[in-house]
């Protein structure tokens, strides 16, 4: 599924984010930047040890913020590591933190002159964010960004399975 917004393209695909050829892929990292499960582990395994070496030098990243490294053996040029919130019932500012994780990643990519970025479904795995709500926040942030900025030309959501893809597709239809 692909739509044009302003001068950019927003796309949803089911697949493996480690295979993306965008300027940057986004890693749903933990605050220590020390690798982990899910997409975080997959990116570190596929990218090789150079990503972890850079993460160690950076030292950490607060929830809702983003940092950037090279991409090691990946096809993308960079990995943007962002920390989404652990879902705690929705009353601890999780929505604002999730929005900030996406927006911080987009702003960091733009500041580096990158034109394309691929996101996973941040916080929907081991951090237990409800999928439909997370999809709405992710897509609204991306749509709003593309409407207000022309620096990034392509935002791809690379969704691991059909259930996640379907949830994102349903939310995108509501937004545009």
Image (spheres, grey):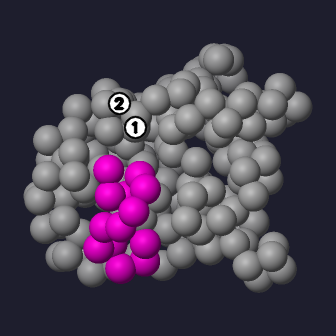
In the visual, does 166 lie left or right of 70? right
For label 2, count other residues whose C-alpha is less than 10 Å away and answer few (under 14), some (14-19) or many (20+). some
Question: What is the C-alpha distance between the residues marked 2 and 1?
Answer: 5 Å
Check contact, mark 2 vs mark 1: CB within 8 A: yes
In this view, 6 is above or below 101: above
| Magenta stretch bounds | 30-42
Q: Residue at x 25, y 55 (%)?
A: 44
| Residue topped by disc 1 | 17
Q: Which quadrant would residue 46 be assigned to in this image? A: top left
Q: Which mark is residue 141?
A: none
Report helix, strand or loop for mark 2.
loop
Quadrant location of residue 81? Answer: bottom left
**Residue pictured at 49% horizontal, 68% vertical:** 83
Which residue lies at the image location 46% right of the left edge and 37% below the top edge?
118
Compared with 8, 174 (above or below) is below
Look at the image and say whether residue 41 sits in the magenta stretch: yes
In the rendered image, residue 110, in percent from the top left (x then y), is placed at 44, 45
User: Can I make out residue 16 in this image?
Assistant: yes
Quadrant location of the C terminus? top right
What's the mark number on residue 20? 2
- Callout 1 crowding tier (Cα within 10 Å): few <14, some 14–19, many ≥20: many
């Amino acid at each position: 599924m692909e739509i044009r917004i302003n001068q950019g393209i927003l796309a949803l695909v089911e697949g493996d984010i480690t295979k993306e050829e965008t300027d940057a892929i986004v890693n749903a990292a933990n605050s220590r930047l020390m690798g982990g499960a899910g997409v975080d582990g997959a990116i570190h395994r596929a990218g090789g040890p150079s990503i972890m070496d850079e993460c160690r030098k950076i030292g950490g990243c607060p929830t809702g913020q983003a940092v950037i490294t090279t991409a090691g053996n990946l096809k993308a040029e960079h990995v943007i590591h962002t920390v989404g919130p652990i879902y705690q019932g929705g009353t601890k500012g999780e929505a604002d933190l999730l929005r900030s994780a996406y927006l911080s990643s987009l702003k960091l990519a733009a500041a580096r002159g990158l034109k394309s970025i691929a996101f996973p479904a941040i916080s929907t795995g081991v951090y237990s964010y409800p999928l439909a709500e997370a999809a709405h926040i992710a897509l609204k942030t991306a749509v709003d960004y593309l409407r207000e900025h022309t620096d990034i030309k392509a935002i791809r959501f690379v969704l691991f399975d059909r259930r996640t893809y379907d949830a994102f597709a349903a939310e995108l239809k509501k937004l545009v």
